[in-house]
Image (cartoon, rainbow, N blue to C red):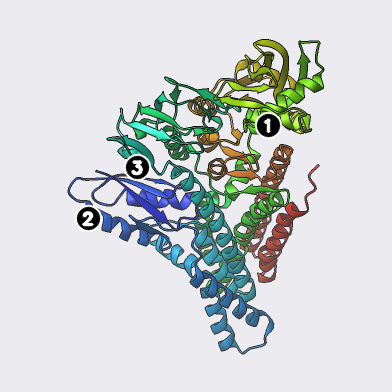
Amino acid sequence: MKIELNVIGLDCAHCALTLEKYIAQVPGVISANINFSTSKLFVDVEEGNYSKVYKDIIKKAKEVNPSVKISKNKDDPSKIDICGITLYVFGILLALIVMFVDVNNILYYAILIVSALCMGYKTYWKAILQLRHGKINENTLIMLSIIGAVAIGEGGEGLMVIALYTAGKMLEARAVNYSRKSISSLIDNQPEYAIILRDGKEVMVKPENVVVGDTLVVRAGERVPLDGVVIDGEASIDNSHITGESLPVGITKDSNVISGSIVLDSVITLKVTSLYKDSAVSKILNMVSNATNNKSKTETVISKIASYYTLGVILSSLLVWGIVWVITGDITTAVYRGLIFLVVSCPCAFAISVPLTYFSGIGKCSRYGILVKGSNYIDACAGINKIVLDKTGTLTTGKFAVDKVSVVDNKITSDELLSIVVAGESKSNHPIAVAICEYYAKKPSVKVKKFREIAGIGIEYSIDDSDYFVGRENSQNGKTIVAIKCNGKLIGNIELSDTIKPETKATLAELHNLGISTMMLTGDNVGIAKKVASQIGITEYKAGLLPEDKFKIIRKLKDDGEKVGFVGDGLNDAPALTLSDVGISMGLMGSDATIEASDIVIADDNLKQLPRLIKIARKTKNIAMGNIIFSAVIKLSFLILGALGITGMAMAVFADVGVTILAILNALRVLVYKVK
């Protein structure tokens, strides 16, 4: 029996993996999988034993991670922990008393202990519970660092450690919860209702309750909830969020319509051809949900080394005590040198500087309008070697512009031709009509009568005694052609194209200079794709793609060992965004669902932010690795000197506090980094 549960309180993928491991060991559980991105727990349990297993799962989760809540109901992950924040602020106030007010020893230690508990009680409790399960991680590191600081009389330093660490965890939890909420929002972004005809009456039902063969009614402005074939009506539909095709598509009787399409200008009646679970939009949403399972569960560097580092320090400390005791015969000297060993190896430099470096990187990105949903995505961006980009709305503006006006009938001028065309097009809301009217930018000098818009074909109208038709012809050389006819005779053509963003070509060139290869994917036809590719300087592209095609291409690239970043702006890009190592959405042009599915959002919709993002990410990772190497080398040197009795406690404090301060200052360099 398979069940789906909601998980609240997970703030890192590493914690999710740990919890998943222990839940899988609960009696009656066959298998367990936690989707960290969507905050879902999928459990396969033995038949007939659900109630007991469910209670045992909740109990085990609390034992492993007291911050986690598992339930059948969906809670809001972004809910603010008022109690936790209040205790944290109170702890900060007590810490200020410890550091700046002269109090006696008993009161000093009482305030110190209360302050440390208020700011880090969750961290200590996690460390204790996880130690019971033989797990040593960064919670253990923090707890040991505070104990070590207090042991040498540096209580203020210990409070600083827990204050900065807890603040960082709060910020990280907010970023993670936002990301999780966003992806869950995309998965829930499905049609709320469908209107079907039953006994000649319109009935509103859930899409899941519609069966194949039902008659579906969709009005202008509504989204088609299920796949179907038109049995009555004509209309223009917007498929841009499904196929990436920027042009509206005309549909008539017997036309196939896929779910997710938006009807623009009329009422149509459809015969349903597939169940909701088999519809196009449902498949897209399912791909997004499943793609998060395929994504690498990135850990921060400190989380990766934490258990090995702490265990190694503890064992090495015991070894130092034993060796010094045997050699000197003096247990006091042995304890003193062992304490020096623990103080020097206090992980403050790692536990504070590395997360601070990544948070600084996130802050630096935000100054440029690059919104990063978690520190792990900064790390992932630094390793990208291929960026795949959607065309419409990403490399191009997604808006039509007139390129050329050609007059066939020499009896009229181009201005007169445009006046005739705009007189009719001004009555239409079609994107091509809007583009032509914006190009002419004047009020037409003639008036029309008998106006009629033929969905997906064009418009018909009369001026004086002449009948005019304005409509699309087949695209040529990557351009959209609009033909103008008078009384059935061609009198002119207007060429339009989706305009390329001014920064596109320079951005791609800069990415290539950074050693990153690029690829363009589009739902448009090959002719348009080829023309755009040649104009922007991209050699690798694929055209005529559906969402599943983009998804498959990204998966193939990842299987080939590429570290892939995907940039897109439509619902059709959501599966590829989620599957890629880093999904980047274009803010202003992007759909809400796409922005929510992505890992990084470029708020100002400017492609030039891509190279900037890569540079900041690489700088951030280099500084983080530099802090790790610098701290490790210094600490290792002083560990050896301390074990040999060459350095005392004062130098041990320097090796701890001094290295920590230097590492923090180095981490803050990200904030002042000038991106060239």
Q: Is 18 in front, or is 240?
A: 240
Residue 125, compared with residue 293, is above or below; it is: below
Cα separation, mark 3 vs mark 1, equals 38 Å
Instruction: Determine the secondary structure under disc 2.
Output: helix
The residue depicted at 74 percent of the width and 59 percent of the height is: 665
Q: Which mark is residue 45?
A: none
| Residue picked out by circle 3 | 206
Cα separation, mark 2 vs mark 1, equals 65 Å
Instruction: Determine the secondary structure under disc 3.
Output: loop
Which amino acid, mark 2?
Ser
Residue 508, compared with residue 631, is above or below; it is: above
**Residue 292 location in percent, x, y?**
47, 40
The residue depicted at 78 percent of the width and 44 percent of the height is: 675
Q: Is 198 in front, or is 550?
A: 198
Q: Earlier in the sequence, mark 2 or mark 1?
A: 2
**Residue 449 in the figure: left or right of residue 338:** right
| Residue picked out by circle 2 | 51
